[in-house]
Image (tube, rainbow, N blue to C red):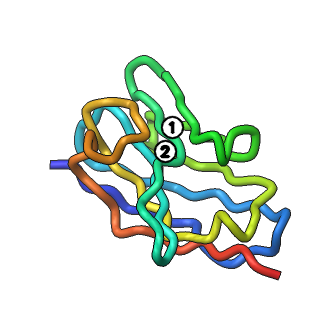
Amino acid sequence: QVQLVESGGGFVQPGGSLRLSCAISGDYYAIGWFRQAPGKEREGVSTISRSTGNIFYADSVKGRFTISNDNAKNTVYLQMNSLEPEDTAVYYCAAGARATLMSQWYDYWGQGTQVTVSS
């Protein structure tokens, strides 16, 4: 059993930054960040493999978002810079068996944290 708790969401103006945290209890192979905006499908944002360190990003966030992990704290972070209104969504972290942006590979999910980008 893996439990995940996200934090760090909030309201920010376009061009601003936020850092999301995902605190993890239990063993996992990969952590993914996903987001879902109202009326839209859930989208894979970024993922990191705990063992290999492999990292992947969605094209929509490349160069703006950075995923990292602190194994000592069992926490994965998503640093989000140059935020745009299109980044507004509920952000979820998930634990799974494969470092992929496809949600079907993830078995455990956090409760989500809201990110709102608006002027």
Report which quarter residue 59 is drawn in. top right
Residue 41 falls left or right of residue 2? right
Q: Name the kind of residue labelled 1 in the image.
A: Asp
Labels 1 and 2: the sequence-earlier one: 1
Above or below 45: residue 14: below
Q: Total of numbered circles in the picture?
A: 2
User: Do callouts 1 and 2 mark residues in contact (Cβ within 8 Å)?
Assistant: yes
Residue indicated by mark 1: 70
Secondary element at image label 2:
strand
Look at label 2 and name its amino acid.
Val
Residue depicted at 69% across the width and 39% down the height: 62
CA neighbours of label 2 inside 10 A, class few (<14), some (14 to 19), many (20+)? many
Residue at (26, 39) in percent of width and height: 105
Find residue 103 and report its horizontal and vertical position in percent.
Answer: 33, 47
Q: Which x, y percent locates residue 79? A: 66, 50
Q: Position of residue 12 (x, y in %)?
A: 75, 74
Q: Nearer the viewer, residue 73 or 111?
A: 111
Q: Residue at x 53, y 48 (%)?
A: 45
Residue ID for mark 2 = 76
Q: Which numbered mark, 1 or 2, is in the foreground of this view?
A: 2
Numbered disc 1: secondary structure: strand
**Vertical placement of residue 113 versus 28, above or below:** below
Toward the top, the furthest residue is 52
